[in-house]
Image (cartoon, helix red, strand yellow):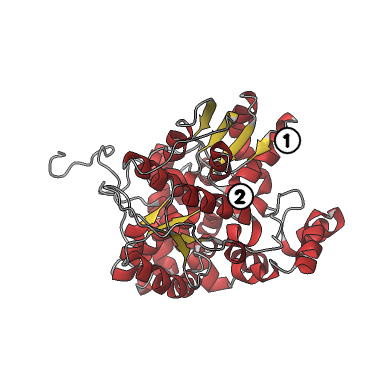
């Protein structure tokens, strides 16, 4: 324990998170924000431990080093936004690097400070059309499920002239991978559960509700159908919520906190009723799980419904591993899959649940798992923006190299968008094209169902 009047160099205690005080008028005050940015930038400049994580920290350190004083006071406040723009809220600096997070008295929460700066910028100057389009996943998802429309849009996304036009008009990089729309949505294709018998385990609820996620519902319903097949095979009753909207993470990335609140007003009443009926809530995208487990509770810390949903949320493999420990999961795997280069996404890591996907995959006989735990660089909408795509590919370069070197039969990540970014990077940098498959899809293959 530090004596009175002294400052600890760092903290050996587990990080704690303070709520996001976004309803406080001071949160939106530009002068107050600049003062906090200068305070935290001073701490970061003196530490530099996070220099390898993303583009935000090298940008900050270059601004300081190239300034007239060599200190943060030499950086014009008008240039603080250059640092903010490089942050994509992966949370890894907070969870794995920074020694000054709470409960340390310096109280550094770099991601949420960047979020505050994004929110103030958006409220002051308005949103960009590109950011509004990319974060309005339910509106763009209206195109899914209509065969003629999806075929047309998918063709546009593959057309070099149209991609060049999109880059010029919207700022979506012409080289970045973009998802295709499905001809049938997951929520339409899912059907009904095969079993209705609820077997409650010591660690796990015996019934599941699936939060589809925009990506699985509109773009890759096969992942959701594979998860449904696994639940059916293990005789776990499941259902969908009657209604759902985007989890809000794309809005959060843009600093659109009012947009997040509007989506919360749709999702939480649906999910909390199921949580209180004893359902485990699963999503197929780590960012969506994190939104309900962490970001919404930090935005609405006094909302009992939000906290009840938080407590009912599970990553799919977190649930499956716990179900196995309860002795209620089948391990009758029929097919070996060879070698898998598996990537742990940042939004899975910050949930502090351990490597549950890796743990489960290693239960499959004959399967060789080579795990990489480092940022892919995709980071939601960050990786498709013209001004940031090259940086996203640069951040991912060490991951591309490590995964390619293992000569895998499959590459896989719990983050399906990050998986496509990895596939693109491996193909471009190493001229290799191992099959990309979500871990859930690999497990279904192993079961042979």
Q: Earlier in the sequence, mark 1 or mark 2?
A: 2
Picture coordinates of residue 269, whole percent (x, y): 39, 74
Quarter of the figure that contains the N terminus: top left
Which residue is rendered at x = 55% and y = 36% of the image? 446
User: Which residue is at the front of the view, 181 or 420?
Assistant: 181
User: Which residue is at the front of the view, 322 or 407?
Assistant: 322
State the residue lying farthest toward the right: 161
Which residue is rendered at x = 71% and y = 32% of the image? 429
The label on residue 427 is 1
Picture coordinates of residue 427, whole percent (x, y): 73, 35
- Crowd class of label 1 (few under 14; some 14 to 19; many from 20; radius 10 Å): some
State the residue lying farthest toward the left: 4
- Relative horizontal placement of residue 47, taking residue 333 as reference (left or right): left
Picture coordinates of residue 277, whole percent (x, y): 32, 66
The label on residue 49 is none
> Element at badge 2?
helix
Quadrant hosting residue 426:
top right
> Element at badge 1?
helix
Which residue is rendered at x = 41% and y = 60% of the image? 196
- Name the residue beneath numbered marker 2: 417
């Amino acid at each position: 324990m530090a004596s009175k009047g002294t400052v600890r160099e760092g903290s050996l205690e587990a990080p704690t998170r303070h709520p996001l005080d976004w309803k406080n008028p001071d949160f939106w005050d530009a002068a107050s924000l600049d003062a906090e940015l200068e305070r935290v930038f001073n701490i970061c400049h003196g530490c530099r431990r996070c220099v390898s994580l993303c583009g935000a920290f090298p940008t900050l350190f270059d601004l300081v080093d190239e300034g007239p004083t060599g200190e943060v006071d030499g950086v014009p406040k008008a240039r603080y936004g250059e640092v903010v723009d490089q942050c994509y809220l992966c949370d890894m600096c907070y969870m794995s690097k920074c020694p000054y997070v709470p409960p340390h008295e310096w109280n550094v929460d770099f991601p949420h400070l960047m979020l505050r700066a994004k929110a103030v910028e958006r409220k002051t100057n308005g949103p960009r059309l590109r950011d509004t389009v990319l974060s309005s996943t339910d509106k763009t998802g209206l195109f899914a499920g209509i065969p003629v429309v999806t075929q047309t849009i998918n063709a546009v996304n593959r057309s070099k002239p149209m991609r060049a036009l999109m880059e010029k008009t919207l700022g979506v990089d012409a080289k970045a991978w973009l998802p295709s729309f499905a001809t049938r949505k997951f929520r339409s294709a899912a059907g009904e559960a095969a079993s209705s018998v609820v077997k409650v385990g010591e660690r796990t609820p015996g019934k599941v509700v699936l939060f589809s996620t925009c990506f699985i519902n509109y773009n890759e319903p096969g992942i959701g159908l594979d998860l449904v097949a696994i639940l059916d095979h293990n005789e776990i009753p499941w259902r969908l919520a009657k209604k759902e909207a985007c989890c809000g993470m794309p809005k959060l990335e843009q600093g659109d906190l009012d947009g997040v609140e509007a989506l919360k007003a749709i999702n939480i009443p649906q999910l909390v009723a199921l949580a209180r009926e004893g359902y485990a809530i699963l999503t197929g995208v780590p960012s969506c799980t994190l939104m309900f487990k962490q970001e919404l509770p930090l935005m609405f810390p006094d909302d009992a419904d939000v906290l009840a949903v938080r407590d009912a949320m599970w990553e799919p493999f977190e649930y499956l591993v716990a179900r196995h420990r309860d002795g209620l999961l089948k391990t009758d795997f029929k097919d070996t899959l060879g070698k898998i280069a598996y990537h742990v996404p940042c939004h899975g890591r910050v949930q502090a649940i351990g490597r549950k996907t890796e743990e489960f995959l290693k239960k499959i006989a004959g399967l060789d798992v080579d795990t990489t735990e480092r940022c892919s660089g995709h980071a939601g909408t960050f990786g498709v923006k013209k001004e940031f795509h090259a940086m996203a590919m640069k951040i991912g370069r060490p991951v591309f190299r490590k995964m390619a070197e293992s000569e895998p039969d499959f590459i896989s990540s719990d983050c399906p968008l990050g998986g496509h970014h990895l596939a693109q990077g491996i193909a471009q940098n190493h001229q290799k094209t191992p099959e990309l498959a979500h871990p859930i899809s690999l497990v279904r293959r192993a079961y042979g169902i």
